[in-house]
């Protein structure tokens, strides 16, 4: 979350992806950084122990949401 | 007129607002805070550093408020300040121990004359209850992580289990009953200096070994420090602490072991044979013969040897769970008295 916000502050579009176990954590960090409601992509947990094929499945879940957030107008992102 | 009931109501408010570790705190009021600031020897607005993950400045006054809440006495403040300066050093990387799923706690080891002045326990039940300095100095750190850093449990502190050291994990080295150079002298300080050393570690594991020979004791300590998941792929640049209990130390001293010999022996024997990895269906990222030994640590200096604990019982303790230095590196700070 820190990385995504920092990258965006430098004018580079970014999307934060985390697993559902870290939803509250992500929301709390966004709030701390003064961006409550900062949108991010949430995918199923876990990631760390997945095989290549399962990881690809996670990427497929994330992809449309990533595209959606990258193309979202700023005034919609509240 | 303020009644006891009002006081309890106030304490409960701190609890309700999640400003405690789950136990009642002393409500910080102006006079106590001022006393605590004065005991630090620093101005109230002096900035000690930036506390992650909220990344806010920690002033001496804020440290004093949390020290009051934790139940510290003013004479603990020099230790509290040095402890905070140590954990706020860049290389300690406080954000990692504050938030990691690994659930480490911050062990604080105090050396030097200040231990006596503040009655810090270095002996029996050294990790246990009953000693105000040990209980409240560590608690101050936990309250600051919670209240200033904002690393609340289950939200930003994502420990899977955590451990009891997250309430307090403060010990003193029993220098007076140790034949070895104390930790702070190993780290380049003078014996008459008082210091605080901080390391992010798992809970202590007990090494109960009644064997009468020094080498057997050291092999038992090495064994407890060598689970496969701790050895990893070997050669780690992460730290551990071995607490030598009085009876084990007496055996080692009687046999003429020096601290450096003990450290070297442990370095050479903490680890596992390649065949153990294979038997556990665990792959190593390199090829070696079955009988080759994979040492857990990169060099002996990652093994800190400290003397503590109570007189009766042939027990030492291993505190490890080390991670590479890029995540966290132990720090030692001199206490300004």
Image: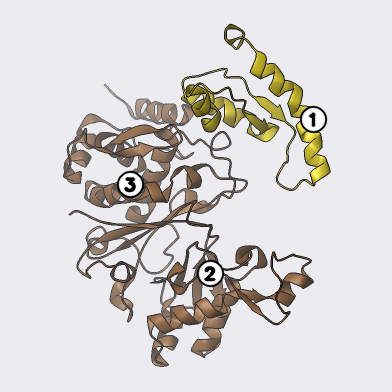
In which image quadrant can residue B44 be found?
A: top left
Name the spot of residue A23 as percent of width and height, x first.
Answer: 64, 29
Foreground mark, 2 or 3, reads 2
Determine if marks 2 and 3 fall on one subunit: yes
Q: Earlier in the sequence, mark 2 or mark 3?
A: 3
Is residue B4 shown left or right of residue B203? left
Residue identified by numbered label 1: A60
What colour has chain A? Answer: yellow
Determine the chain carrying the residue at label 2. B
Separation of marks 1 and 3 at Cα, in angstroms? 45 Å
Q: Position of residue B305 (x, y in %)?
A: 41, 72
Can residue B130 be spotted in the picture? no
Q: Quadrant of residue B88?
A: top left
Identify the residue shown where x is 38% and y is 27%: B10
Q: Which residue lies at the image location 21% right of the left edge and 32% below the top edge?
A: B45
Which x, y percent locates residue B269?
A: 56, 79
> In the picture, which chain is brown?
B
Disc 3: CA contacts within 10 A as few (<14), some (14-19) or many (>=20): many
SS class of the residue under badge 1? helix
- Residue B158, percent across and down? 58, 40
Tell me, yes or no, if residue A74 can be seen here. yes
B285 sits to left or right of B192: right
**What is the distance, in whole Å, between disc 1 and disc 2 at their CAs?**
40 Å
Q: Disc 2 on helix, strand or loop?
A: loop
Placement of the C terminus of chain B among the 4 image quadrants: bottom left
Residue under label 2: B297
Q: Are marks 1 and 2 on the same chain?
A: no
Chain identifier of the residue bearing label 1 in the image:
A
User: Disc number at residue B84?
Assistant: 3
To which chain does the residue with label 3 belong? Answer: B
């Amino acid at each position: 979350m820190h990385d995504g916000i920092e990258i965006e502050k430098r004018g580079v579009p970014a999307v934060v992806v985390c697993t559902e176990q870290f939803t509250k954590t992500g929301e709390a960090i966004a709030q701390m950084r003064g961006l409550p409601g900062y949108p991010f992509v949430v995918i199923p947990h876990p990631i760390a122990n997945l095989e290549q094929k399962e990881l690809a499945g996670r990427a497929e879940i994330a992809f449309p949401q990533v595209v959606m957030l990258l193309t979202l107008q700023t005034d919609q992102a509240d | 007129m303020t009644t006891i009931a009002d006081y309890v109501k106030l304490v409960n408010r701190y609890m309700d607002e999640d400003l405690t570790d789950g136990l009642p705190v002393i409500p910080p009021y102006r006079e106590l805070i001022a006393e605590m600031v004065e005991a630090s020897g620093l101005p109230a607005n002096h900035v000690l550093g930036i506390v992650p993950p909220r990344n806010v400045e920690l002033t001496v006054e804020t440290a004093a408020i949390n020290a009051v809440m934790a139940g510290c006495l003013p004479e603990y403040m020099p230790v509290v300040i040095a402890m905070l300066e140590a954990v706020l050093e860049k290389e300690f990387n406080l954000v990692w121990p504050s938030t990691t799923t690994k659930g480490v706690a911050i062990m604080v080891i105090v050396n030097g004359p200040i231990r006596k002045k503040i009655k810090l326990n270095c002996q029996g039940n050294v990790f246990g209850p009953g000693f105000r300095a040990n209980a409240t100095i560590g608690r101050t750190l936990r309250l600051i992580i919670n209240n200033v850093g904002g690393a609340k449990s289950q939200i930003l502190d994502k420990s899977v289990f955590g451990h009891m050291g997250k309430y307090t994990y403060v010990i003193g080295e029993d220098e007076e009953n140790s034949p070895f150079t104390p930790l702070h002298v190993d780290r380049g300080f003078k014996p008459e200096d008082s210091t605080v050393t901080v390391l992010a570690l798992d809970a202590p594991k007990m090494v109960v070994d009644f064997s009468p020979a020094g080498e057997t004791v050291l092999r038992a300590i090495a064994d407890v420090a060598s689970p496969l998941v701790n050895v990893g792929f070997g050669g780690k640049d992460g730290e551990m602490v071995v607490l030598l209990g009085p009876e084990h130390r007496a055996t080692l001293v009687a046999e003429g072991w020096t601290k450096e010999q003990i450290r070297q022996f442990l370095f050479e024997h903490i680890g596992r044979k390649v065949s153990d990895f294979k038997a556990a269906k665990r792959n190593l990222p390199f090829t070696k013969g079955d009988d080759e030994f994979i040492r857990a640590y990169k060099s002996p200096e990652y093994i800190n040897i400290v003397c503590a604990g109570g007189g009766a019982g042939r027990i030492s303790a291993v505190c490890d769970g080390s991670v590479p230095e890029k995540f966290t590196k132990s720090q030692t700070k001199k206490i300004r008295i």
